[in-house]
Amino acid sequence: MFKPQQTSQQFAPAREDLAVHIQHLNYFFGAGDLSKQVLFDISLELPKGQIVILTGPSGSGKTTLLTLAGALRSLKDGSLRVLGKELVGLSDRALVGVRRNIGFIFQAHNLFESLTASQNVEMAVELTGNFSSKRDQAGAMLSALGLADRVDYKPQSLSGGQKQRVAIARALVNHPKLILADEPTAALDKKSGRDVVNYLHALSREEGCTVLMVTHDNRILDVADRIINLVDGRLESDSSPNAFIQSKQGDPTDVSADMFIM
Amino acid sequence: MARVSVAWSNLLHERTRLLVAISGVAFAVILIFMNLGFMGALISTATNFYEQFNADLFIISTETLEISTSTAFPRERIYQVAGIDGVERIMPLYSEYLLWRNPETGVSRAIFSYGVNPNDPVFLMPELQGDEARRILSRPNTVFFDRLSRPEFGPQDIGTTTEADRRQATIGGTYTLGGGFAADGTLIMSDQNFVRYLKPRPLNLINMGLIQVNAAVSPEKVAETMDSLLPADVAVYTKPGMIDHDATYWLEATSIGFIFSMGVVVSFVVGAVIVYQILFTDIRDHLPEYATMKAMGYRSRYLFKIVLQEAILLAVLGYLPGLAAALGLYHLTAKATAGTLPVAMNGGRVIFVLGLTLLMCCLSGLISVRKAITADPAEIF
Ligand SMILES: Nc1ncnc2c1ncn2[C@@H]1O[C@H](COP(=O)(O)OP(=O)(O)OP(=O)(O)O)[C@@H](O)[C@H]1O
Ligand SMILES: [Mg+2]
């Protein structure tokens, strides 16, 4: 006989200090004979306010883990608590509610070309129902990201880095407690990528929000409090940036501590 | 502050696409208006001349399909009802096609001819009233000519002399009546002239019996009495009943009603397909943005609203130029047919087509919106 309360008993109780709390998470794509497991028994604790970088080879399951933490896929196995809410077994409708408290930053900016920078950001504010202050909120967030003079520009007249900063403004304008970013600098040149990460870092420190960021970009590892390495769907290592660099020493093409001197 | 109008911005952003969409909707709107216009004109022209018939009741053969496809019946029938209470006057009406020669080109063409007793006030047209008109009508080989006849019949000036069925004919006067869908033109002449032109047509076979009743009695009541008195080869109609009889013939017994309704349906489908194509392309191009909105926490209902708003905007933006163009085309059609096809707009049709356009666009919107709703926010990472 199936007893749901027994399942939950296997897991540690909810903890106030954790933004994300993953326990024994397995994830499969497909069903039946075609089903393929991409995440194996993942357990992970992300305390509030931390900036965590998720790295690993292509196809190791980083994006999948991010979409799960972002309440973008429904889950049946293990335990996944995001901002105090258990996502396993949640309905699609309830997942949408959870997502409103999360800021998403994608590799592509996904801005509406037909809307101005401010309007794109305002779309996020409208979700909170603050119609009277939305323009001010959008303007303030764009200014914080150095785009005060680009508020009424459409994406086509912004540079790649500026567009990505608008997308970040959209993700942050509602002051989410959790930010999920998947290779936010991949489409940017070195300078713009650096700028974007610096803004993200500064804002996270000010707002005290948790950041989980997937990146292949070794130049930005220094902003992290912690680096997690995922290989073939398993957590391979979980360390501080310096320890991570040490472990990679001897592989000169990969990472060197010099990169951290800004 | 109002919501950011994603629908409006998206439409305006792609100017060329917007223009194509508006043209597509406008095109469908014009086609629908033209079909309805022709259908409406048909119904009204097929019957509006009855308004000029100075009678309350009409007796026709049961085999008569509409006025120009009539079967003659014995004149006795109207004498049989002359004595009924309330009947003021009975008037025989003869009608037949006659070949009218255009004196300028020499080409002959069938014209619909009425034969009346010059002493009977059969028609209400002012030109046919009075002693002078009666005198002209009584002259041999003289006819009154319908100014709404097609120009192909030639000059309409009084005094014009030509041939009708190889007999001389002179236009002694003109009037305005119109021949409906069947007739390109009409003539009115005395019964004596009528039998002369249409030899060997006897005067005791008539095509229609016109009856005027006393203002104190109800025409419907009198019609009932007549029906019970008359044999089954004829039927009695009131004026609205007569108009209805002919209109029904044109709409049902012929395929004209079907054709124009079909035209409306086809135009509707064409418009719907165009709008669907435009909306679908628009949704496909914005799929990552829509998926991002879902990731941010927007529900499918919101995307649904955006697409539906775009559909309604397209409907209104396409309807207005479509209506304007249709009004122009109505005017041109009425002019090109010399007023014989009075294609005219009416309020009911303006609203009906607007509703049809909204329905067309919303249907397309509903079909294409499925794509936006299935946008999976997990796939855009
Ligand atoms: N929708 C899907 N259906 C089936 N399999 C999938 C799907 N999405 C991803 N996968 C598979 O799951 C595995 C993990 O994919 P994922 O995108 O999480 O990797 P990743 O670590 O983000 O890789 P990359 O660094 O290239 O972005 C891969 O083997 C991939 O082929
Ligand atoms: Mg990935």
Image (tube, coloured by chain):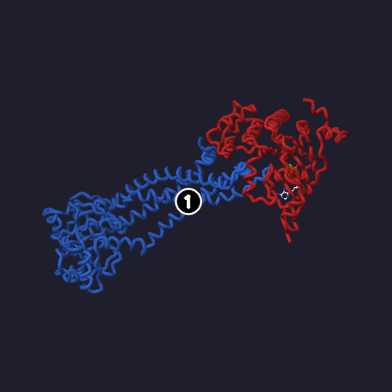
Chain colours: A red, B blue
Image-quadrant location for residue A184: top right
Q: Is mark 1 within 8 Å of ligand 1?
A: no
Count numbered badges in the picture. Answer: 1
Q: Which residue is mark 1?
A: B360
Give how far across and how far down residue A2 sits, in percent. Answer: 73, 59
Image-quadrant location for residue A236: top right
Q: Residue shown at 39%/49% (left/top)?
A: B351
Image-quadrant location for residue B114: bottom left
Where does ligand 2 appear, by image quarter?
Answer: top right
Q: Quadrant of the N terminus of chain A?
A: bottom right
Image-based side of B217 in relation to A48, left or right: left
Image-based side of B210 in relation to A86, left or right: left
Q: Residue shown at 62%/34% (left/top)?
A: A173
A65 lies above or below B149: above
Which residue type carries mark 1? Answer: Met
Q: Residues within 10 Å of mark 1 (few under 14, many from 20)?
A: many
Label 1: element kind = helix
- Residue closest to the eye, B207 or B30: B30
Q: Quadrant of the C terminus of chain A?
A: top right
- Residue closest to the eye, B117 or A184: A184
